[in-house]
Image (cartoon, rainbow, N blue to C red):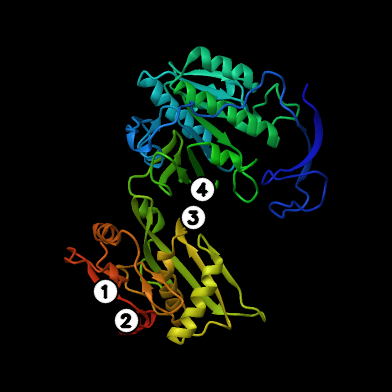
Amino acid sequence: MAKAKTQYSCTECGASSPKWQGQCPGCGQWNTLVEAVVETAAPAGRNFAALGGASGLQMLAEIRPREEPRQPTGVEEFDRVLGGGLVAGGVVLIGGDPGIGKSTLLLQALARLAQASEKVLYVSGEESGEQVALRARRLQLDVGRMQLLAEINLEKILATLVKLRPAVAVIDSIQTVWSDAMQSAPGSVAQVRECAAQLTRFAKQSGTCVILVGHVTKEGSLAGPRVLEHMVDTVLYFEGDTHSSFRLVRAVKNRFGAVNELGVFAMTEKGLRGVANPSALFLSQHALDVAGSCVLCTQEGTRPLLVEIQALVDASQAPSPRRLTVGLEQNRLAMLLAVLHRHAGIVCGDQDVFVNAVGGVKIAEPAADLAVLLAIVSSLRNKPLPGKLVVFGEVGLAGEIRPAPRGQERLKEAAKLGFTQAIVPKANAPRQAIKGIEVIALDRVEQAIEQMRAW
């Protein structure tokens, strides 16, 4: 028999502690440790086999890898984020805020797969069969060939999967599933880890693609232990405001495709619809050129994306000026302001600086630095930038403008959308002229500021 003892696990990061304490030793959050019963020894007959099939010793040079075939879901933006479609035996973990559209998107994908004569299974642990059927009717989906199981017991779910052998199975959600082998409550760290491991093992052995739906914490990360992200093949995050009609699906891990790929959806009465030209969502429509606005051409996975960066610089009414960013890294803003002071002689020490990426998109790449600086200077001097100007480039602490990856693709995307001027790093200057766009290649921050004065 397995011995049980009491431990305290963090509900935010999954770290454990032998005794209760106010602050989690893993993530530093307060009052997140909850009591959990864990097993110290494995029950008789229980094994911990590898998730993949066991194999003997091999020479790496003799192994001939094969291209994994893709199964398109019929939802183009979803397929883009997945890297072309679902992979047999792959495990996908998708997380997001409640009500943002996870279940809606997966129900649409399964309905289209079922229409293509694929055997699919939707396991609902949070809703009854009647509720799922009501959503499918509201979305006007053809679910005649789609099978549903309303169950939260892991052993019953696995028995159904073994009997049915579906091509794709959705578990909505992994936090509601519980196993008889564990004594802790559903949603606890031990239950989530064990259930995910069993489902992943089944996927690798049977070839069924398993999609797990995960809850998120207040900080927006997946709830439960971080081992879930290491265990699965693909991790997707839903982004966007639930009060807005637009949703973003971002891949933060993908063993079968490009990471940081982005899919853009619009929420309609008939579910999520892919947006063919997402750049139009992130560009504001101004009747006249306005100060503090600069268009950035960022790269999301394999897709160039045009995003408007807005800055507001105003005299501070407090002893400590505020530095606030939305969609951009706040610490990087402080660094850029220091570079602007040191190398361009522009002081913002007594000014409040607010920077926003329009449309709710989150930009992590450093190629947004130059666009942020020009938007700040434009707002400070109340001088609008040209309306058909696009900018990208990383700014270093020495004041140099560093190149950005895939510069040619960014410029071609900007020219296709009607932009006529571009400020880019000197290393990204195209060897041959791109029709319809004038490229201004610079290598210093002060040169960019001088270019603004010339306009």
Left or right: 11 with respect to 419?
right
How far apart marks 3 and 1 lie (CA) works out to 29 Å
Label 3: state its secondary structure. helix
Picture layout, residue 250 above or below residue 327:
above
- Quarter of the image for the C terminus: give it: bottom left
Which mark sits nearer the N-terminus, 3 or 1? 3
Q: Amino acid at mark 1?
A: Ile
Label 1: state its secondary structure. strand
Label 4: state its secondary structure. strand
Question: Which residue corresponds to mark 4?
Answer: 239
- Quarter of the image for the N terminus: give it: top right
Q: Residue visible at 60% across and 80% down?
A: 316
**Location of residue 25 in the rendering, given as x and y in whole percent from the top left corner:** 74, 52
Which mark sits nearer the N-terminus, 2 or 4? 4
Q: Which label belongs to residue 440?
A: 1
Q: Are marks 3 and 1 in contact (CB under 8 Å)?
A: no
Which mark sits nearer the N-terminus, 1 or 4? 4
Q: Are marks 4 and 3 in contact (CB under 8 Å)?
A: yes
Question: Which residue corresponds to mark 2?
Answer: 451
